[in-house]
Image (cartoon, coloured by chain):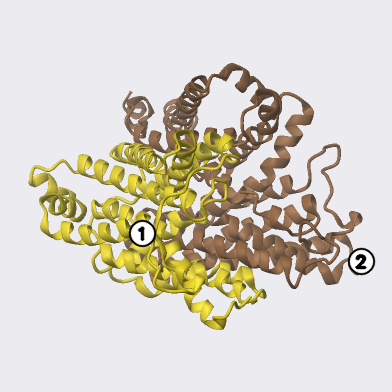
């Protein structure tokens, strides 16, 4: 995981507006991830097209359906945005620790436990407090549990040297088992027969939609979380310290930076966001906590974060893009007779190609800011 | 419920379960040991395992031969390993991240191509009935052991010997301990790692084949419960020692059999918590064996996992 030391503010200020060079320098630096990212997506789509051709279907039809299903109409755009909402939060669960050089892939665990915690926290207060207060309680409960869960992976990493990638994934399996235990045991609503669930929230205690749209408030919460994360990483001194620690732990320790607290803090915030995704799933979509919480948002979030190169603002468009791909899955299944796993194959292909294309960074002179300095 | 042997059924079921559940762990962890000994980590073995399970099942359905199914799974697993190994040789590519991507890709491909094979029934892999001396059906069932278990045990012994005593074993360890030393000796580290990852993938796919062709013996999208991932942790616990892998796999198999064993004697409370036992055990073992200050004893020097 590399830390980019790009600060547009500095390079623009240095140019005094008189010369284009600083702007070109800044553009060169900024264009590299965008250009390489786009080329990676094109290569990925090309490989996926070959696969679709091999199994005897038309990639053109497939991409057309993908566009129609994801972004072709106001209805499908709203569908994509709804699906993007949890991805924004689960992607942050990967991106924030990644800036410290950690690879956390167990966000799914924080999502399911966050959902259960939110549902449990809501129970005594339904009908007692106003809905907005209830959402605050639910959100706090979900963020605390999610934060503890992923924070534990960060804690074990720093203080016990346990690999955080493996521990976070193990914690995700444990979390799903715990969720099943709670939902089928102490928190089960006796009325839920076929699909064990917690007691559903009454309709007037559901989170509802953004006015004028068929998209729930989770999208707004997710976007705010991304902006807050961007500020945390790019503006605050904590973020600066985290980026130093992500670049070189030894150097950060020698500088006296509290690496341990940074790691635990960032992983806890990351887990808090993933937990919030679970709370939104309960308060805005399902109405109760049940096995549907483990819908794979945590895993798609990994892809979103890597595609966005762990930049919280870039997560927003990438999450919408993947939400759209996700939303088009049903249409592809119905119209082309392809299995629902088609979307997974496409995501996996894109993921591999994008990581492969990391090797192209620094290979092209046109993106080298020094080139523009010298001219 | 008790069928005459009473609570003795629990240890017996755990013993039988340890052998039955451990076989995939043995193969995946031995495969990962080979890969990691070459200095690279393949986190994508979960995807390889599931793809191997699908391939084995599909080929067994189509040809009627479970053996051909296992061989096909091995070939598919090797291809997955080759992709991983080839991509990782490029500079700036992170092997852990590629592993995660390969996992998602492998799962997606397996679910995609495996869709038509969920319904048909494939012939099972043969097992050897070693319990003929006993008249208790539970004992006979427990000692009905699959061929792959014995192959896995033999492979663990062979690898333990081969790492120390063969030219190939030495080359693998040199590459894993120091890329520079290997280059100085005229060895191409990328090629060794490529082959080590391919062999690792092919062994992981055998683990998958065991799942779909013997126990539980069907193909569906929930066939694996994370064995491919736990195996990575298991290799750390076993200190990259093949015999350690074999023993750790038995331990994990026993933990995995705990829930069903207790259920069989009527303990139904907290079923899901027992189901989590292998993951909890893995985590505890990782916590106990890791250290923040020193690198792990026996760890290959060039491995990114332990740095």
Image coords of residue B159 (percent x, y): 22, 57
Chain containing the residue with disc 2: A
- The residue sitting at 77% across, 64% down in the picture is A119
Image coords of residue A137 (percent x, y): 77, 66
Q: Report the chain shown in brown.
A: A
Q: Give the quarter of the figure containing the C terminus of chain B.
A: bottom left
- Number of other residues with Cα within 10 Å of mark 1, as a class: few under 14, some 14 to 19, many 20 or more: many
- The residue sitting at 49% across, 25% down in the picture is A51
Label 2 secondary element: loop
Image coords of residue A270 (percent x, y): 57, 58
Chain containing the residue with disc 1: B
Q: Residue furthest bottom?
A: B7
Q: Give the quarter of the figure containing the N terminus of chain B.
A: bottom right
- Residue A227 visible in this rendered orientation of the protein: no
- Depicted A323 relative to depicted B161: above or below: above
Of residue A264 and residue A374, the one placed in the foreground of this image is A264
Q: Residue furthest left?
A: B185
- Depicted B28 relative to depicted A191: above or below: above
- The residue sitting at 28% across, 54% down in the picture is B36
Q: Are marks 1 and 2 in contact (CB under 8 Å)?
A: no
Tell me if A137 is positioned left or right of B288 in this view. Answer: right
Q: CA distance from mark 1 to mark 2?
A: 58 Å
- Depicted A64 relative to depicted B236: above or below: above
Q: Which residue is mark 1?
A: B149
Of residue A303 and residue B142, the one placed in the foreground of this image is B142
Image coords of residue B65 (percent x, y): 42, 40
Of residue B266 and residue A281, the one placed in the foreground of this image is B266
Q: Report the chain shown in yellow.
A: B
Label 1 secondary element: helix
Total numbered labels placed on residues in the image:
2
Q: Which residue is mark 2?
A: A127
Tell me if B140 is positioned left or right of B262 in this view. Answer: left
């Amino acid at each position: 995981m590399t830390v980019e030391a790009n600060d547009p503010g500095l390079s623009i200020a240095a140019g005094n507006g008189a010369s284009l060079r600083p702007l070109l320098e800044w553009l060169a630096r900024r264009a590299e991830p965008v250009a390489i990212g786009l080329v990676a997506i094109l290569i990925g789509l090309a490989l996926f097209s070959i696969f679709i051709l091999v199994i005897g279907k038309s990639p053109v039809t497939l991409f057309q359906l993908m566009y129609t299903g994801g972004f072709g109409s106001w209805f499908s755009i709203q569908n994509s945005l709804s699906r993007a909402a949890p991805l924004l939060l689960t992607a942050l669960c990967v991106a924030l620790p990644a800036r410290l050089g950690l690879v956390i892939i167990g966000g799914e665990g924080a999502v399911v436990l966050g959902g259960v915690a939110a549902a449990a926290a809501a129970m005594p207060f339904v009908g007692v407090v106003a809905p907005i207060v209830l959402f605050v309680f639910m959100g706090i409960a979900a963020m605390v549990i999610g934060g503890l869960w992923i924070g534990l992976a960060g804690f074990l990493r720093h203080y016990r040297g346990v690999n955080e990638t493996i521990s976070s994934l193990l914690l995700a399996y444990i979390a799903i088992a715990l969720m099943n235990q709670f939902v089928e045991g102490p928190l089960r609503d006796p009325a839920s027969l076929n699909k064990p669930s917690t007691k559903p929230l009454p309709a007037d205690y559901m989170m509802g939609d953004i006015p004028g749209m068929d998209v729930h408030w989770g999208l707004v919460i997710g976007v705010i979380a991304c902006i807050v994360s961007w500020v945390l990483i790019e503006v605050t001194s904590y973020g600066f310290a985290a980026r130093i620690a992500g670049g070189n732990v030894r150097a950060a320790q020698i500088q006296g930076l509290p690496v341990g607290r940074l790691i635990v803090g960032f992983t806890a915030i990351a887990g808090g966001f993933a937990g919030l995704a679970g709370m939104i799933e309960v308060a805005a979509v399902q109405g109760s906590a049940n096995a549907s919480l483990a819908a794979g948002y945590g895993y798609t979030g990994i892809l979103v974060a890597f595609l966005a190169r762990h930049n919280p603002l870039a997560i927003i468009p990438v999450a919408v893009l993947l939400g759209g791909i996700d939303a088009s899955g049903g249409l592809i299944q119905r119209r082309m007779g392809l299995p629902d796993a088609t979307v997974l194959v496409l995501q996996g292909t894109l993921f591999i190609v994008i990581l492969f294309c990391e090797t192209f960074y620094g290979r092209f002179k046109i993106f080298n800011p020094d080139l523009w300095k010298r001219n | 419920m008790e069928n005459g042997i009473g609570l003795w059924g629990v240890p017996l079921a755990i013993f039988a379960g340890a052998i039955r559940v451990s076989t995939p762990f043995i193969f995946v962890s031995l495969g990962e040991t080979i890969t990691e000994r070459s200095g690279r980590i393949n986190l994508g073995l979960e995807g390889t395992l599931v793809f191997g399970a699908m391939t084995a099942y599909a080929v067994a359905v189509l040809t009627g031969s479970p053996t051909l199914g296992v061989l096909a799974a091995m070939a598919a697993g090797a291809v997955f390993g080759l992709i991983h190994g080839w991509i990782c040789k490029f500079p700036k590519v992170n092997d852990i991240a590629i592993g995660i991507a390969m996992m998602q890709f492998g799962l997606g491909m397996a679910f995609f191509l495996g869709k038509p094979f969920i319904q048909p029934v494939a012939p099972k892999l043969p097992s050897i009935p070693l319990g003929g001396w006993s008249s208790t059906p539970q004992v006979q069932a427990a000692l009905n052991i699959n061929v792959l278990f014995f192959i896995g045990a033999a492979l663990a012994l062979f690898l333990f010997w081969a790492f120390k005593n063969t030219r190939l074993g030495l080359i693998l360890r040199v590459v894993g301990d120091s890329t520079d030393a290997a280059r100085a000796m005229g060895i191409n580290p990328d090629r060794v790692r490529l082959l080590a990852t391919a062999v690792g993938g092919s062994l992981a796919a055998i683990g998958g084949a065991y799942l779909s062709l013997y126990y539980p013996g069907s193909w569906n999208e929930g066939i694996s419960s994370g064995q491919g991932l736990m195996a990575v942790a298991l290799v750390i616990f076993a200190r990259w020692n093949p015999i350690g892998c074999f023993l750790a796999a038995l331990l994990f198999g026993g933990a995995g059999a705990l829930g069903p064993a207790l259920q069989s004697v009527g303990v139904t409370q907290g079923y899901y918590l027992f189901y989590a036992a292998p993951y909890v055990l893995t985590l505890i073992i990782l916590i106990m064996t890791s250290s923040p200050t020193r690198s792990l004893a026996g760890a290959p020097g060039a491995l990114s996992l332990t740095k």
